[in-house]
Amino acid sequence: MIVLSDVGRRFGTLWALRNVSLEIADGATVALLGANGSGKSTLLRLMAGLTKPTSGQVRLDGSEPRKCKARIGFLGHEPFLYRYLSATENLRFYADLYGVDRSSVEPLLARLELDSKGPALVHTFSRGETQRLGIARALLHDPDFLLLDEPFTGLDERSCTRLPELLFRSGRTVVMSTHDRARADELATRQLRLEGGRLSPAEAAPA
Amino acid sequence: MKTVLALAAKDLRAESRGRQVAPVMVVFALCLVFLLTFALPPGALRAPVPAPRAGALGARDLSGLMLWTTILFAGILGFGRSATVDREGSAADGLLLAPVDPAAIYTGKMLGNLAYLTAAELFAIPLFVLFANVPVGGLLPGIIPVALVANIGLAAVGTLFGAATQHAEARSLLLPLLTFPLALPVVLGASKLTSTLLIERGFGSESRWFILLSVFDVVFVTLGAVTFEFVIEE
């Protein structure tokens, strides 16, 4: 379970998030909606432990995010990949960091239809290929908490259709930010809206 | 240890493809060695060692400083570039997310920087020998332990501040500003030992500088490993 208690995050004099309290049950799929700059990315980074809250606390199954890094998969705006390593080398490197068997890299690349791109250096990848490789990196260690910042960005229609079957599994909690209301309706068990750093339940989509 | 080696190997592998760090250091070091040794009188380092005169500095006294100042400047260029590799694509965040001890990240990065420094020296020292007309027998093999202890100290400080300044707007200014003062003991010690090698063909009484450099290495490697977590986090 992900629990945020009265979380706030300030950058300089600007509060990106204020008084955010939230509980996300195990296995839930939550869509974060909101305009640009509403605090979605900051909220996801707080859950991942990449950003510390200015006030309040974040707990994943009762622990600080930094204490359960091996259970968190995170996809940010950037892919967290090394441009001058190949796709396979990037994933093998992260496999070493997470203590994952390197033999899991090739099947994962195949699942994301990147098997033919394994030896290619990342700086030669298209936007969509980079995004898929970033998703592979986030999934590599089979995380219990998957935090995705606009995961469909840059993906073609085929990849968008295939992505959900890769992301969801029993017991995995998925929190994703998106601007795509239709996709949120399709995938999420719960929708939340951020406005000016404050959280509210999203209204139902118009019929 | 496996993580440390994976981190260092990742940096070296990326560098072997991107060539963003070592060539910059090597070219800069070669240019500076050429310029500085140009100031020495021809054959100054092969002439008999003159009797010491109060307050007088000979070419041998200065040559060590020339060499290690060059290596410090080249190192600073390299440390900045090395840290940039992790900033591109926010790969540093990927490291922070992983269940890895920040001390291991620091040590891995430091090993990479150590390799870049050594690469720069493999070019700069022979060129120094050539341009300054240094008697090779005087410099070898003593320069090897000097370079070893000095490189560890420089890489320890450079890796720490390279990472610390990565999110700063004026990082290209901040890195030398922070690194220079702290690297001074290393440059002084290594210069003194190199000059002594050229004058006395051994370290003699100046071997105490090894103790200073070794203590510096231990202090800054430990400090870097302990503080790296706070340095790299947002």
Image (cartoon, grey):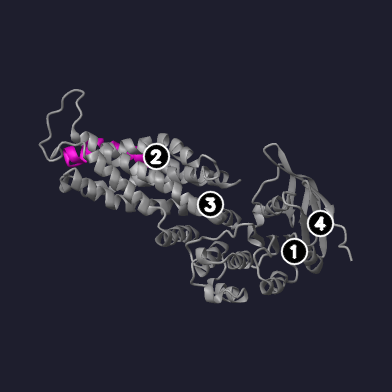
Indicate which disc residue A192 carries. 4
How crowded is the residue under tag 2: few (<14 C-alpha within 10 Å), some, or many (20+)? many
Q: Are marks 1 and 3 on the same chain?
A: no
Q: Amino acid at mark 4?
A: Leu
Task: Point out the tag, 1 or 4, that comes first from the N-terminus.
Answer: 1
Q: Give the structural element (helix, strand or loop) at label 3.
A: helix
The residue that mark 1 highlights is A173
Foreground label between 1 and 2:
1
Q: CA distance from mark 4 to mark 2?
A: 53 Å
State which chain disc 1 sits on. A
User: Going 53% across and 73% down the picture, which residue do you hit?
Assistant: A117
Q: Residue furthest right?
A: A207
Indicate which disc residue B216 carries. 2
Foreground label between 2 and 3:
3
Magenta residues span B195-214
Q: Amino acid at mark 1?
A: Thr
Q: CA distance from mark 1 to mark 4?
A: 15 Å
Task: Judge from the rendering whether residue A26 lies leftward or rightward of residue A80; answer left or right.
Answer: right
State which chain disc 2 sits on. B
Q: Main secondary structure of the magenta part?
A: helix
Q: Is the residue under label 4 in contact with that under label 1 (CB below 8 Å)?
A: no
Q: Is residue B103 above or below residue A104?
A: above
How crowded is the residue under tag 1: few (<14 C-alpha within 10 Å), some, or many (20+)? many
Q: Amino acid at mark 2?
A: Phe
x then y, percent, for residue B122 = 28, 52
Q: Are marks 1 and 4 on the same chain?
A: yes
Q: Is residue A16 magenta?
A: no
